[in-house]
Image: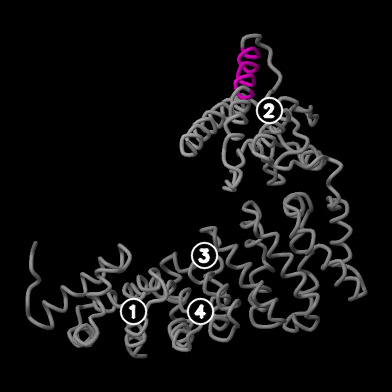
Amino acid sequence: MADATETNADTLRRELQKVLTEIFNDGGGKDRGETEDCFGFLKAIDEAIRILTCLRKVESKKPEFDISPVEVPKEFICTLSNTIMIEPVIIASGQTYEKRYITEWLKHERTCPKTKQILSHCLWIPNHLINELITQWCRVNKVDRQKPSDELATELFTGDIEALLQRISSSSSVADQIEAAKELRRQTKRFPNVRVFFVAGIHDSITRLLSPLSALGEAVDSNPELQENIITALFNLSILENNKTVIAENRLVIPLLTKSLKQGTAETRRNAAATLSSLSAIDSNKIIIGNSEAVKALIDLIEEGDLLATKEATSTVFNLCIVLENKEKAVSAGLIPAATKKIKAGSNVDELLSLLALISTHNRAIEEMDNLGFIYDLFKILRKPSCLLTGENAVVIVFNMCDRNRDRSRLKVVGEEENQHGTFTKLAKQGSVRAVRKAQGILQWIKRFVTGKEPQRA
């Protein structure tokens, strides 16, 4: 009975999603000149309300203890605030947004945030129909929906951000700079809207934000609290997809992040690495960062940093090494000894093995791992892997070490490990799909090149 109820609920949710998509693709209630179009739109709204009513009845029959999370229809979420809309309004493009966010946007932009089209006017009208749909959906799914008066947090808008930026870049008081940077850090963390406007709505905002650190030159960490707040605010800004390219292409950003990887508080170093990790999600930024001194600084942080700093630095280098030419740069900058040293010490093993698995197709990387005797550390990991992914990455590295010219001396070492511990036979039975495939390949090489026996064919 419970399964049937859940099936009915799922069916209704799919129907609702389909109708909502049709409504929003049709303009979300945009004004129409054609009576037929208007009738069709209202009919779709009626159908959505009918489905919601049925869904409410079905949900009421579900057991009280069912606490599975509810997926919010994406049409109910404002793309500026990333939250369920409280006061949905329609703009000239026909798109619907949260009133307070789009109002601020339209003070400074004449385009639609989603479609990028130039708007014929900057007025908006309440979207009562979508508001009613959201209200009914929240009621059906027992989701608390805020009211406009419920929003107690004070969010800064562009005028306030400009004032903070002026204090950070121009104040003669270091204490005032710190206070302003701390507030900007808080705002960029809490409010997506601030992240949008800071980069898109204020001229030269990134340069002005970083100017106090740039002015300090090599003594960038002479005011560690100011440095930490500015770098962390920069990280918060980098989270937004549209900001990543603008930030990375600013001439101050990569050099100052590189210095902050080396100098400053532990949190500054971690957040500098996290910012580079965020920026490196964009392919063009991988090239920019790869051509800078940041690669060497990241690898030094892998070797010297604490658990969290090493994790962030490893993530960044992994992103960079997806680009082929950056693999050579990372190896030249000392990645292999830094990573293997950390793994031997038992620190950040899972993340670093993932990175080494990615880079183990590089000949020089294999040579350095071989010279460091790293294959014996891999054997220890493979005998008792902490998880399937760790075992997979370790066996991928062993496979690539063996695959290079099918070196008989290396294969002999691998064969001895198999004879003593049955490491690869176990992995071929218990590992992930990829690990099984690599382990089976290693076993075939052992039979062919070490024992002299050809593998049995099925």
Q: Residue at x 45, y 69 (%)?
A: 321
Distance in Å between CA atoms under marks 3 and 2 = 38 Å
Q: Residues within 10 Å of mark 2 (few under 14, many from 20)?
A: many
Residue at image mark 4: 348
Distance in Å between CA atoms under marks 2 and 4 = 49 Å
Q: Is most of the magenta stretch helix, strand or loop?
A: helix
In primary-sequence order, the first of circles 4 and 3 is 3
In primary-sequence order, the first of circles 1 and 2 is 2
Q: Is residue 278 magenta?
A: no
Residue at image mark 2: 94
Q: Residue furthest top?
A: 35
Amino acid type, mark 1: Leu
Nearer the viewer's eye, disc 3 or disc 2? 2
Q: Residue at x 73, y 39 (%)?
A: 85
Q: Residues within 10 Å of mark 4 (few under 14, many from 20)?
A: some
Quarter where residue 292 is shown: bottom right
Distance in Å between CA atoms under marks 3 and 1 = 34 Å
Mark 3 falls on what kind of element?
A: helix
Amino acid type, mark 2: Gly
In primary-sequence order, the first of circles 2 and 4 is 2
Residue at image mark 3: 287
Query: Relative to 170, is 83 on the left or the right?
Result: left
Residue 382 circle label: 1
Amino acid type, mark 3: Ile
Distance in Å between CA atoms under marks 1 and 2 = 57 Å
Q: Residues within 10 Å of mark 1 (few under 14, many from 20)?
A: many
Are discs 1 and 4 less than 8 Å apart at CB? no
Nearer the viewer's eye, disc 1 or disc 2? 1
Are discs 2 and 4 less than 8 Å apart at CB? no
Distance in Å between CA atoms under marks 4 and 3 = 26 Å
Q: For this rendering, which residue is in front, 265 or 158? A: 265
Magenta segment: 37-49
